[in-house]
Image (cartoon, grey):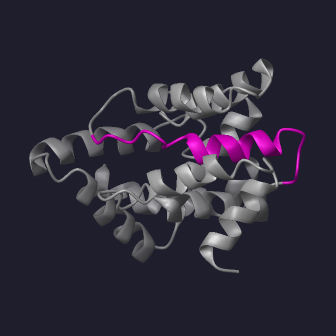
Amino acid sequence: MDETKYLTKSWNSVLIKRDTLLKELFSVYRKPGRYYHNLRHILYMLEMLDKIFDRKPNFSLIRLAIWYHDFVCIPGAIDNEEESVREARSRLYFTPEPSLGIIEEMILSTKHDVPPSTREGQIICDLDLAILGSSPESFSLYESQVRLEYLRFSDERYNQKRSEFMKNLYSRPQGVYCTNEFKRLGFEEQARINLKKYL
């Protein structure tokens, strides 16, 4: 199954007859300058969700949070996640408030500033950071793609902020990842190897 078909099938498993929203999401994630935070990132997260985690009652909400967590992605901005929540709420207005609250919590958790407290938040955070536990080659490609998104920043500024972010992840008491599923599959060990360059 090709990328577009998989993404469409995944979307339709959550929201049927909401093609306008899906088309908008395709357009947003295909914008120029999204070298990493694009449809491939969304696809990777959705595929990992399907492969690693059992289907739970909030599985559909996790899918929606994945779709909208990088809806707003302005390099260097400190409120991307908050703005993504705002955009998600305005488009998913037909969703009951308790569900919107869960989606909001998940999107905000992808700031990765504090460990998420809910199971849903832990899952989406691990999915968002899954690339850190990939092969050295995939991790290197990821690093180069993210740098391209931040080209307007000097190497000095970029490297400083990047190092701070990675060191924070590396030093978290619970580890880089939150879920036992990711730890069992060896993501933690590989992520710590990849992140050593920042120590």
Q: Is residue 19 magenta?
A: no
Could you say which is closer to the camera, residue 58 or residue 87? Answer: 87
Q: Establish if 144 lies above or below 158.
A: below
Name the residue: 9% across, 47% down.
154
Where's residue 63, x and y in %? 71, 47
**Residue 113 shows up from this direction:** no
Could you say which is closer to the camera, residue 90 or residue 161? Answer: 90
Left or right of residue 194, residue 103 in this image: right
Name the residue: 52% across, 68% down.
134
Q: Is residue 55 magenta?
A: yes
Name the residue: 47% across, 33% down.
111
Left or right of residue 127, residue 193 in this image: left
Query: Where are the magenta residues, as a range?
Result: 54-75
**Residue 94 shows up from this direction:** yes
| Quadrant in which residue 148 is drawn | bottom left
Q: Establish if 143 lies above or below 113.
A: below
Which residue is most to the bottom?
A: 1
